[in-house]
Image: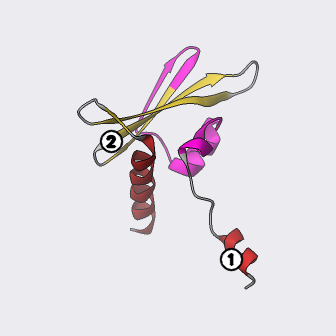
Amino acid sequence: LPPDAAERDTPPSVTIEGLMGADEARLHRLLGQPQFRRNDPPARLLRYRAAGCLLDLFLYPKGTAAHRVTHIQARGRDGMDRPAPPCLDAILDARKKAKTG
C-alpha cells in the first residue's frame, strides 16, 4: 500500500480540540454512549467515565442548529479539576479495550 493509503485506513486521533463543535451523533461515533446525560435547557451535559476521571461535555444550540460541544471539563473522582487530554485518552483506551474484548 502507498503510505497515504495506509494513513486513510487509520482513524484520525480524537483530541479535545477535535471534540469542540461536535454534535451528539459525532460524539457517539467517537466515544460511544455517555454514562450520564442531563438536559438543562438550553444546555445538555454528556458525561463519560474512565478509571480515575470524568469528562463532562457541555453542548449548547447555535441558532437553529443542533446542540454542539462548547465547553469541556475533566475532573478526578475527588471532584478536583484535571487536564482533559489524559482523561480523554483513558476513555478512548477503555472503549478500544471493550471493543476488542
Q: Which of 17/28 is in front?
A: 17
> In this figure, which residue is indicated by the disc labeled 1?
6
Kind of residue at badge 1: Ala
Position of the N terminus by quadrant: bottom right
Kind of residue at badge 2: Cys
Residue 80 is a magenta residue: no
Q: Which of 19/82 is in front?
A: 82
Q: Which residues are magenta?
A: 16-44
Q: Quadrant of residue 16?
A: top right
Q: Residue furthest bottom?
A: 1
Q: Residue furthest top?
A: 41
At mark 1, the secondary structure is helix
Query: Residue 97, labelled with which disc?
Result: none
> Local crowd at mark 1 within 10 Å, few (<14), some, or many (≥20)?
few
Residue, x 56% and y 14% (percent of image)?
Answer: 41
Position of the C terminus by quadrant: bottom left
Image coords of residue 35 (percent x, y): 40, 39
Q: Is residue 69 left or right of residue 32?
A: right
Image coords of residue 58 (percent x, y): 52, 27
Residue 17 is a magenta residue: yes
> Local crowd at mark 2 within 10 Å, few (<14), some, or many (≥20)?
many
Structure colour scheme: secondary structure
> In this figure, which residue is indicated by the disc labeled 2?
53
Q: Which of 85/56 is in front?
A: 85
N-terminal-most mark, 1 or 2: 1
